[in-house]
Image (cartoon, coloured by chain):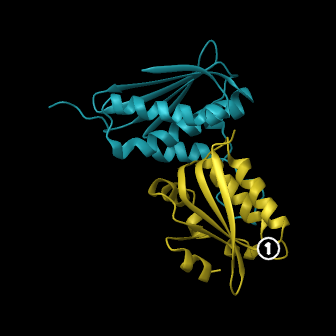
Chain colours: A cyan, B yellow
């Protein structure tokens, strides 16, 4: 199932909703919904904010492989590898004014595998969550 | 239009406490709504804040950056007291998990009862 749209931050709630509708249709267990919602939101926010620097074309695709959920995001923004994202700083408020790196940290904490690939036209981000799809006996 | 609404009220007790009731999603699209509303309250004299998150259906990293920014508006004369001037009330289990994953629970108290939150300020 896939969604293609020109997305700005105003579309975040619509994209989160689509991700959960797709996950539901694919047989993902409800206990994984919060993690999927969070990972998709963080990834799309990064694409809009850091990739395009504003609204841009995004394709969101959810599929399954056995009991695993695979979430793919494609964009046409300049190549950006999450491996080069700024490190997470969890210092308390008062010790720094402008915290960063939270998004990638959260994505990594709720998904089992995250991989970035530069494509001819932009980026493809693949996030996998293991053992969350109901598989018929 | 923002899909985050914020109602503001004040409890006058030993300390004047400003309660901000958040309804909707706290994400990159709405983080400035919270920051702006909190700045408005602080400019009007608010020193102690409670963020009532019972109505927040989504909290992401941008929302946490907003909470961080709100904390930094408080106690301008003593930065070490900033976290003590803010309490969070009734986050959903998903929001509480984000709070904990990013380590915010180590310096901002989370309460499930408003009287306890007020008493803790």
Between residue A95 and residue B121, name the one nearer to us.
B121
The correct choice, above or below, for A108 with respect to B45 in the image is above
Residue B13 higher or lower than A83, as above or below: below
Q: Which image quarter is the C terminus of chain A in?
A: top left
The answer to which image quadrant residue B27 occupies is top right
Residue at position x 41%, y 42% in the image: A33
Please give the name of the residue rendered at 84% of the width and 67% of the height, measured from the top-left corner: B44
Q: Is residue A89 visible?
A: no
Is residue B24 depicted above or below A129 in this figure?
A: below
Which residue ends up furthest to the top in the rendered image?
A: A120
- Left or right: B23 as drawn, with respect to B74: left
Which residue is located at x 35 percent, y 33 percent?
Answer: A24
Q: Secondary structure at mark 1?
A: loop
Output the chain of dot 1.
B
Picture coordinates of residue A71, whole percent (x, y): 45, 29
Which quadrant of the view contains residue A51?
A: top right
State the quadrant of the N terminus of chain A: top left
Can you tell which quarter of the image residue B71 is in?
Answer: bottom right
- Image location of residue B62, percent across then percent down: 65, 47
Picture layout, residue A129 above or below residue B67: above
How far from the left and from the top, in percent, is residue A65? 32, 26
User: Can the viewer see residue A42?
Assistant: yes
Compare residues B11 and B65 and report the one nearer the observer.
B11
Disc 1 crowd, CA 10 A, few/some/many (<14, 14-19, 20+): some
List the residue tagged with mark 1: B75
**Residue displayed at 51% across by 30% down:** A115
Front residue of B110/B89: it is: B89
């Amino acid at each position: 199932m896939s969604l293609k749209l020109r997305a700005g931050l105003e579309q975040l709630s619509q994209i989160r909703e689509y991700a959960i509708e797709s996950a539901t249709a694919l047989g993902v267990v409800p206990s994984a919904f919060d993690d999927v919602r969070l990972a998709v939101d963080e990834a799309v926010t990064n694409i809009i904010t850091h990739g395009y620097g504003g609204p841009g074309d995004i394709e969101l695709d959810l599929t399954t492989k056995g009991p695993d959920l695979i979430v793919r995001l494609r964009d046409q923004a300049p190549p950006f590898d999450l491996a080069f994202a700024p490190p997470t700083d969890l210092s308390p408020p008062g010790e720094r004014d402008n915290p960063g790196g939270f998004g990638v940290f959260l994505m990594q904490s709720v998904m089992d595998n995250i991989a970035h690939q530069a494509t001819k036209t932009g980026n493809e981000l693949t996030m996998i969550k293991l053992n969350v799809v109901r598989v018929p006996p | 239009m923002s899909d985050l609404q914020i109602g503001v009220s004040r409890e006058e007790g030993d300390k004047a406490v400003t309660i901000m009731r958040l309804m909707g999603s706290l994400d990159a699209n709405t983080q400035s709504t919270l920051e702006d509303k909190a700045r408005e309250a602080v400019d009007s004299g608010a020193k102690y804040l409670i963020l009532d998150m019972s109505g927040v259906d989504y909290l992401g990293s941008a929302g946490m950056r907003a909470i961080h920014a709100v904390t930094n508006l408080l106690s301008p004369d003593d930065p070490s007291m900033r976290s003590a001037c803010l309490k969070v009330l009734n986050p959903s289990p998903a929001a509480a998990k984000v709070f904990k994953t990013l380590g915010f629970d180590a310096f901002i108290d989370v309460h499930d009862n408003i009287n306890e939150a007020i008493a803790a300020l």
